[in-house]
Amino acid sequence: MKIVVIGGTGLIGSKLVKNLTARGHQALAASPATGVNSITREGLAAAMDGADVVVDVANAPSWEDQAVLEFFQTSTRNLLAAEAAAGVGHHIALSIVACERSPANGYFRAKVEQEALIKASGQPYSLVRATQFFEFVGGIAESSLVGDEVHLSPALIQPIASDDVAAALTDVALATPLNGTLEIAGPEAMPLDELVRRFFRATHDSRTVVADVHARYFGDVLNDRSLTPGEHPRLGAIHFEDWLARSAAQAAR
C-alpha cells in the first residue's frame, strides 16, 4: 500500500514511516521539509496520487490559541479535500486522550475541532487518541516552574513512549477503518508530580517538585480523568523507568 504520513519527518511520523517501510509498504514522509504543505496545499495533490491511507501526525507550529485552532482547521480541511479527490480510502489522525475534558487548553480545543471535522467528512476514518509522551515530561516540568520549584498537580497521568504510539498507528494504518476512536496509553498510571520526580532523579535534577492541587496544566486544573484513558485502552509495552534508562544510555553514546 501507499501510505502518506503527514508530519512524516517529526518524532512520531519518522518512526511510523520506518515501521511501515519495514513491513514492505510505500510510506511517504510528507511535510514542508519534503515539499508537502497541508496549509498552503503545496505538493498535496501529488502526494495523494495513488495513496491508500493518510495518517496525520502533524503538529502545529504555534501553541497560541487562535493560531493552533486555525492550523488544525485549515490543515484538516485541505487534507480531507485532497483525499476525497484522490480516492483515498482511510484517514487516520493522531489526537489526545480526554482532550474534550480540558476546555481551557487551547491546543486540546483545537484537537476536538479536528476530530469533529473528520467525523463530519463522511470519509472512512480512525482516530487514535494518545496520552502524553514520555519525551515531553521535561517540557511539562519547565512549564510548571514557580520560582525555583516545580508545582504540579498530583492528578493521575498515564504517559506513553513515542515508540508505542508509532506501533499502534502502524497497526491502525494497515487495518480497516475503525470509523471510531482507539485510545492508547502507557502501561502505568501515576501522579503527575511523581512522574516528574522520577524524571528528575534519573536526570540528576535537584529542583524540588511540589504537589499542588491548584496547579494548572497548560491552563486547566486537573483531576484523575484529565490525562488518563477510559475503559479498555491499548497499552504500550515500554515502562517509564525502562525508557529513562534507555534514553540515558543513548545520551552517553
Image: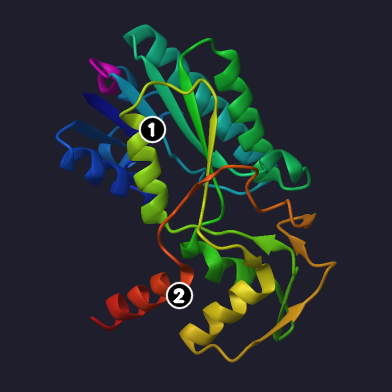
| Residue at which label 1 appears | 172
Q: Nearer the viewer, residue 248 or 31?
A: 248
The residue under the point 85% across, 67% down is 214
Check the image and report above or below for 213 versus 198.
above
The first of marks 1 and 2 along the sequence is: 1
Q: Which residues are magenta?
A: 46-51
Q: Quick check: is 30 in the magenta stretch?
A: no
Q: In the displayed image of the protein, which residue is found farthest to the front? A: 232
Q: What's the distance in space between the residues labelled 1 and 2, CA to CA?
A: 27 Å
Left or right: where does residue 223 sit relative to residue 95?
right
The residue under the point 16% across, 43% down is 22
- Under circle 1, the secondary element is helix
Q: Residue 105: percent from the left, percent from the top?
A: 72, 48
| Residue at which label 2 appears | 241
**Callout 2 amino acid:** Glu
- Under circle 2, the secondary element is helix
Check the image and report above or below for 235 versus 246.
above
Left or right: where does residue 246 sit relative to residue 230?
left
The residue under the point 41% across, 10% down is 84
Picture quarter with the N terminus? top left
Question: In the rendered image, is residue 215 in sight?
Answer: yes
Q: In the displayed image of the protein, which residue is found farthest to the right? A: 214
